[in-house]
Image: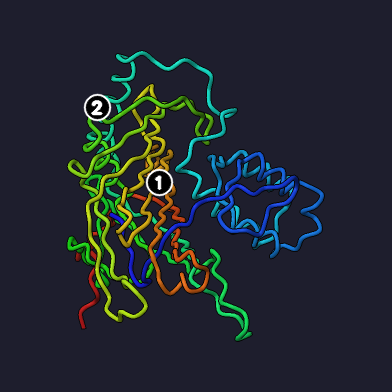
Amino acid sequence: MHRNGGTPPVRICPVLLCLFAFALPICAATTVTVAQLEQFLTSSGTAKLSDDEIADRLSKVELSEQLAADHLNRIYKRTTPGPATYEQLQLLAAASVFLSPPKADVSSLSPPDQPAQDQVIDAARQYARQGLHLVPDLLAMRDTRAFDNRPIETNSKRIKPKVQMHFESESKREVAVRNGKEVNWSLTGHEDTNDSISSTGLQSSGEFGAFLALILNDSFHEHLVWDRWQRSESGTLVAVFRYAIPRSSSHYTVDFCCYRKSQDDPQDYPFKDKPGYHGEIYIRPENGEIDRITLEAEFGAADPVAKSAIAVEYGQVTIGGKPFVCPVRSVAISELHNPAIEKINSIGIVRHVNLVEFTGSHVFGSNARILTDAVRTPQQ
């Protein structure tokens, strides 16, 4: 479900709050609220900084709240960010999807009583079991933009390589969905059920069906707890439940190759585990449709993986002239302990972020035309 390849691993340092007035500091791992972020970007002091300087400061920021699309769009309109700043804002917003929104954005409506909550949960399970299979077999384009913080070499031997999140690559591939489940295709164009595609960087799969079914199957009633009402990006009121799945009940797999235990050890080690995990489920109470699901794996301090998280957002997609609910975008994040990067910044975390969009969904099928011998060529 969530793979990593290529780059060896690392550890997260404590987060420090060191925001002053209208300036974001240059110190690492600063935690700020959405309001503080907006204040910095819209302040007069920001105008004196170049696009690269603003982006550099944003790269050292971690949000403590969810940066929703309406807040992000307001920032864009007020500040007209340069390309480097825009990229860092995109990454901040993507990472914040796993957080709770600012208190001002949470609906003041009273939570439903327990029987009503149970009805919403049951409707979501019913949707996961049946609703997804109503989606026709389809093909969709999966557009993945990959980012990481692997060191950027400088021209000067005196200056250390720069460890900052940056765009790494973009890939497009066609995804086939059959019977409500994503199918892998080999390079020959034939179905490949082995799920053993190898490549470097972060990989995630299963947004169509498998990921949702995994969480709802693991998250039986005692693991789901009411959290809040919240407006979705489309303006719909959704019920948000939190869940936590212990390792003993987990079916979520983290699988990657490879990492190194130290700089002195040249051997590459694989890592595969089924850790416990937690997250949130956004449900439309009127019909049980899933609006968003998030998942964050739980690792021990000695594990080479520091973070493995994925969020999938669903939306209405027209396929064959009919509306269906399908994944429209996803975010996948991994953080790995990396002794090589630790020598550069003393933190030692290599971070991968994939921003995925699904577009061009259309019915999977083919057209055939039968030719008869009604029209013959003249005999010689």
Where is mark 2, residue-wise? 222
> Residue 343, how many percent across, how many down?
48, 74
Q: Which quadrant is the N terminus positioned in?
A: bottom left
The circle on residue 311 is 1
> Residue 322, how many percent across, how many down?
38, 38
> Residue 79, how many percent across, how many down?
74, 49
The answer to whether 63 is drawn above or below residue 105 in the figure is below
Q: Quadrant of residue 192?
A: bottom left
Q: Quadrant of residue 215?
A: top left
Q: Nearer the viewer, residue 236 or 102?
A: 102
Graded by Cα atoms within 10 Å as few (under 14), some (14 to 19) or many (20 or more), the crowding at tag 2 reads: few
> Residue 68, how many percent across, how many down?
56, 40
The circle on residue 209 is none
Q: Nearer the viewer, residue 179 or 260?
A: 260
Q: Residue at x 55, y 75 (%)?
A: 152
Q: Secondary structure at mark 1?
A: strand
Q: Which quadrant is the C terminus positioned in?
A: bottom left
Q: Secondary structure at mark 2?
A: helix
Number of numbered labels in the structure image:
2
**Image check: 322 left or right of 52?**
left
Mark 2 or mark 1: name the one nearer the start of the chain: 2
* In this rendering, the label closer to the viewer, 2 or 1: 2
